[in-house]
Image: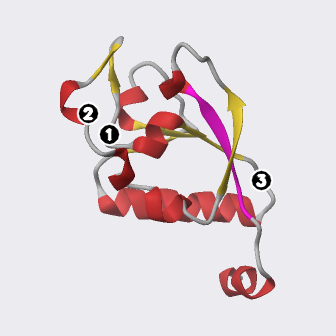
Amino acid sequence: MVLSDYQRPQLADTDALYLGGDKEQQKMIEEKIMEKLVEGGRVFISQQAINFPYWQYDGQQIHIISRGNKNKAQLKEFLRDKRLEKIVEDKNYPLLTIYEIKNDFSFSWSRELN
């Protein structure tokens, strides 16, 4: 499960990957996602991780500083060629939606990882 660092206090999980502002951390998370997908595993991601660092809850409100352009989100380029399948949604709180990351691998691409 990939979560936003803002979600850590409410959703502490030893198996979760928390996306913060660090580029090395982002690269490690992207690599772990790809490894899991190549192995045929399932990877879930929160809407806040997709939007990070924009539109982040801080308690029960959206953090005032995070109300920026979600089209500049940290994982935008990485997720561009992925399919996001909605798994859980509460229409009252759309920023808490959970997706599963899906990928259609080409033979040449998956071969490069081995």
Q: Residues within 10 Å of mark 2 (few under 14, many from 20)?
A: few
Disc marking residue 41:
3
100 or 112, which lies in front? 100
Residue 67 numbered tag: 2
Mark 2: amino acid: Arg
On the picture, is 113 further left or further right than 52?
A: right
Residue 35 point in image, percent of width and height: 66, 64
Along the line of sight, the residue nearer the viewer: 57 or 24: 57
The x, y position of residue 49, in whole percent, is 46, 41
What kind of element bears circle 1?
Answer: loop
Mark in the foreground, 3 or 1: 1
Magenta region, residue range? 97-103
Look at label 1 and name its amino acid.
Answer: Tyr
Q: Please identify the dominant SS of the magenta region.
A: strand
> For the point 74% across and 66% down, which residue is it?
38
Q: Give the colouring mode of the picture.
A: secondary structure
Identify the residue shown where x is 40% and y is 58%. Answer: 26
Residue 28: where, in percent of width, then height?
46, 61
Residue 59 figure quarter = top left
> What amino acid is labelled 3 in the image?
Gly
Kindly indicate the quadrant of the structure image that contains residue 79: bottom right
Secondary structure beneath label 3: loop
Circles 1 and 2: CB atoms closer than 8 Å? yes
Residue highlighted by disc 1 = 54
Separation of disc 3 and disc 2 at Cα?
33 Å
Point 58% across, 28% down: residue: 97
Q: CA distance from mark 3 to mark 1?
A: 28 Å
Please tell me whether mark 3 or mark 2 is closer to you in this view: 2
56 falls in the magenta region: no
